[in-house]
Image (tube, rainbow, N blue to C red):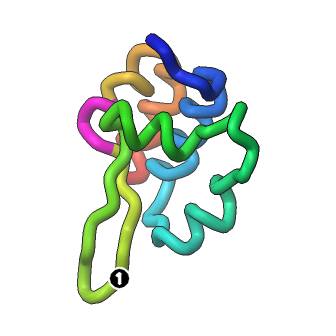
Amino acid sequence: MNSGAPEALILDLLEWTASRERTYEETMDAWRTSCPRLPVWEDANDRGLIQVEQHNGRALVRVTSSGLALLAKTRPSASVFMQRSA
């Protein structure tokens, strides 16, 4: 992997996003950074771990099946929580 963001931060983003419905605006407020050394949002997006979907006129950020699989593999306790809250 040639990711610029530390893997733990990408996993934090995925876990945070999967825990409940998140709008694009809310996600950008929480995760956008101007630091070129921590491109968490960009790396997760480039790796196909998250996506933005339009739903009822709102842009929502969703964890993709690849992102959920990565969470299940690396943070099993987070995936158990997500299954219960889904």
Q: Which one is in front, 42 or 21?
A: 42
The answer to which image quadrant residue 39 occupies is top right
Q: Which one is in front, 46 or 31?
A: 46
| Residue 72 versus residue 53 in the image, above or below | above
Q: Residue at x 31, y 25 (%)?
A: 69
Residue furthest to the bottom in view is 57
The answer to which image quadrant residue 50 occupies is top left
Q: Is residue 36 left or right of residue 20?
A: right
At label 1, the amino acid type is: Arg
Q: Residue at x 59, y 25 (%)?
A: 4
Q: How many marks?
A: 1
**Region in magenta:** 64-68
Q: Indicate the quadrant containing the N terminus: top left, top right, bottom left or bottom right.
A: top left
Q: Is residue 38 left or right of residue 48?
A: right
Q: Residue at x 36, y 31 (%)?
A: 47
User: In this figure, which residue is indicated by the disc labeled 1?
Assistant: 58
